[in-house]
Image: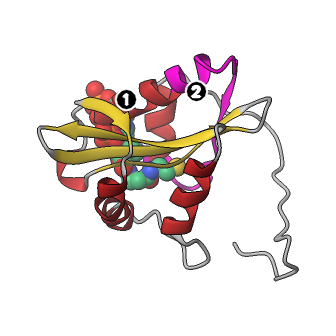
């Protein structure tokens, strides 16, 4: 798998990948998320290709202190071939190149398969409580 920055012509394929992976929530607009990630210098979307096909992707960024990943995805027909490991490694490199020393990510607590994936990559659970608030005043989503 070769990893590169997403280009405009990848956008629809990447959104389809995220949909196929069940990562798009009703309150998120993936196209807007991609646009915002690419608008500045603190985030980007990376895509992994096998031949011409996009098999993996990740939205990676930092907040000036810690790095975060979202939309970590591998084509359901191409999983368990280390593409997940590869796209996460590329996201870690992206952060290292920008001086970010620690990656954080959120997983729903009952998602045991994804927890096993991150644990196999050396991530450990941190005992924290996540607070969130929509800044337009709408009620909190689950
Ligand atoms: C999570 C995901 C990205 C993993 O991608 P992948 O390419 O299948 O993972 P890899 O092949 O790199 O797996 C690396 C290791 O992680 C662990 N792992 C991966 N998937 C696993 C699973 N379903 N159950 C248990 N362990 C798993 C294994 O230890 C694996 O090594 P092994 O195959 O040698 O046993 C992929 O399953 C996916 O896209 N899921 C749907 C989207 C999603 O939930 N994303 C995370 C959002 S927080």
In the rendered structure, the answer to whether residue 59 lies left or right of residue 98 reads: left
On the image, numbered disc 1 is attached to which residue? Answer: 85
Please tell me which residue lies in front, 41 or 84.
41
The residue depicted at 55 percent of the width and 79 percent of the height is 26
Seen at 62% across and 77% down, the residue is 27
Q: Quadrant of ligand 1?
A: top left
Mark 2 residue crowding within 10 angstroms, few (<14) / some (14–19) / many (20+): some
Question: Circle 2 is placed at which residue position?
Answer: 123
Disc 1 to disc 2, C-alpha distance = 12 Å
Q: Is residue 82 visible?
A: no
**60 or 142: which is nearer to us?**
60
Q: Quadrant of the C terminus?
A: bottom right
Residue 92 shows up from this direction:
yes
Q: Nearer the viewer, residue 66 or 141?
A: 66
**From the Cβ of disc 1, is ligand 1 less than 8 Å away?**
yes
**Residue 82 drawn at (x, y percent):** 28, 30
Q: Nearer the viewer, mark 1 or mark 2?
A: 1
Mark 2: secondary structure = loop
Q: Nearer the viewer, residue 122 or 31?
A: 31
- Mark 1 surroundings within 10 Å by alpha-carbon count, few (fewer than 14), some (14 through 19), many (20 or more): some
Q: In the current view of this chain or complex, which residue is farthest to the bottom?
A: 138
CB within 8 Å, label 1 to label 2: no
Q: Quadrant of residue 57?
A: top left
Task: Work out whether 110 lies above or below 29.
Answer: above
Picture layout, residue 113 above or below residue 83: below
The span picked out in magenta is 92-113
Q: Is mark 2 within 8 Å of ligand 1?
A: no
Residue shown at the point (29%, 34%) measured from the top left:
83
Residue 33 image position (x, y, % from top left): 57, 61
Hey, which quadrant is residue 41 in on the image? top right
SS for tag 1?
helix
């Amino acid at each position: 798998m070769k990893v590169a920055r997403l280009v405009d012509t990848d956008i629809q394929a990447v959104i389809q990948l995220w949909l196929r992976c069940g990562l798009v929530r009703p309150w998120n607009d993936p196209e807007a998320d991609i646009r915002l990630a690419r608008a500045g210098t603190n985030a980007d979307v990376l895509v992994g290709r096998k031949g011409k096909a996009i098999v993996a992707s990740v939205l990676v960024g930092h907040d000036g202190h810690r790095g975060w990943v979202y939309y970590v995805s591998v084509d359901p027909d191409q999983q368990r071939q280390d593409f997940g490991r590869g796209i996460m490694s590329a996201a870690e490199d992206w952060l290292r190149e920008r001086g970010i020393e620690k990656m954080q990510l959120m997983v729903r607590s009952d998602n045991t398969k994804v927890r096993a994936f991150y644990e196999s990559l050396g991530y450990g659970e941190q005992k924290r409580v996540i607070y969130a608030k929509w800044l337009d005043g709408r009620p909190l989503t689950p």
